[in-house]
């Protein structure tokens, strides 16, 4: 497909460096402690960090006899705070090719599995509000877990807001590629350092090494 109506971007790993695993682990352990669980099973910590589901989260909280909503509120609050701190300290940075996206002569948006408020922070912190016409992240709710990519929920929202029928979605994970294709979109997989050697089981429409290559892709 060529002549895209819009170009959509993932946030973490595409616009900004992804969060460090150990940072997410620490925030999750702090969330457990906030609801009275001082020694959670490492498998449960890993599941939360890796991307749990509503069903698994409810089962996990039942093991510790803690309220699901209370735990998840703590987790979302502490996880977001840890991300803000890393950006503010300079530990997480904007990729140096991001500002090139303003050269793309079509509407642009951000669609992320991260919190909507975290995406807003990133755009404001790095002065990128002007670069994107819309942005969508997930709500800080238990229910939002089942709406994450590869679910097309937030992609569909962005497309509707932009009035776009065709689009290219730029991501750094297999779930990004799958979400794009499920939504009827083309995908571009960007080979950032953290995913340079990733083997995908689904083929993206395009593979790129830099966002600077997108002008050629979208104009082809």
Image (spheres, rainbow, N blue to C red):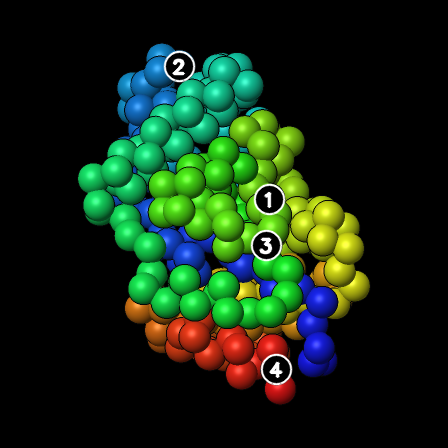
Residue 151 seen anywhere in this rendered image of the structure:
no
User: Label 1 to label 4, Cα distance in Å?
Assistant: 25 Å
Label 2: which secondary element:
loop
| Residue mark closest to the camera, 2 vs 4 | 4
Q: Give coordinates of residue 14: x percent, y percent.
A: 43, 60
Contact, mark 2 vs mark 1 (Cβ under 8 Å): no
User: Label 2 to label 4, Cα distance in Å?
Assistant: 52 Å
Residue at the disc numbered 3: 109
User: Label 3 to label 1, Cα distance in Å?
Assistant: 8 Å
- In the picture provided, is 125 more to the left or to the right than 142? left
In the picture, the disc for residue 136 is: 1
Contact, mark 3 vs mark 1 (Cβ under 8 Å): yes
Residue drawn 50% across the image and 16% down it: 70
Residue drawn 42% across the image and 40% down it: 124
Label 1: which secondary element:
strand
Corner quadrant of residue 97: bottom left
In the picture, the disc for residue 219 is: 4
Residue at the disc numbered 2: 35
């Amino acid at each position: 497909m060529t002549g895209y109506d819009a170009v959509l971007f993932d946030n973490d790993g595409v616009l900004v460096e992804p969060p460090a695993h150990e940072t997410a682990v620490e925030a999750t352990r702090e969330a457990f402690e906030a609801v009275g669980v001082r020694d959670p099973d490492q498998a449960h910590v890993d599941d939360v960090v890796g991307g749990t589901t509503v069903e698994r989260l409810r089962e996990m909280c039942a093991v510790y006899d803690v309220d699901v909503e209370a735990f998840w509120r703590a987790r979302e609050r502490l996880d977001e705070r840890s991300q803000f701190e890393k950006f503010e300290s300079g530990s997480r940075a904007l990729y140096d090719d991001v500002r090139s996206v303003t050269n793309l002569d079509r509407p642009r948006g951000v669609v992320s599995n991260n919190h909507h408020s975290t995406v807003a922070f990133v755009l404001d912190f790095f002065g990128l509000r002007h670069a994107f016409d819309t942005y969508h992240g997930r709500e800080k709710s238990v229910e939002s877990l089942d709406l994450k990519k590869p679910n097309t929920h937030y992609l569909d929202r962005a497309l509707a807001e932009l009035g776009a029928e065709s689009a290219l979605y730029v991501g750094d994970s297999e779930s990004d590629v799958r979400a794009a294709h499920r939504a009827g979109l083309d995908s571009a997989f960007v080979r950032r350092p953290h995913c340079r050697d990733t083997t995908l089981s689904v083929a993206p429409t395009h593979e790129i090494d830099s966002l600077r290559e997108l002008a050629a892709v979208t104009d082809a």
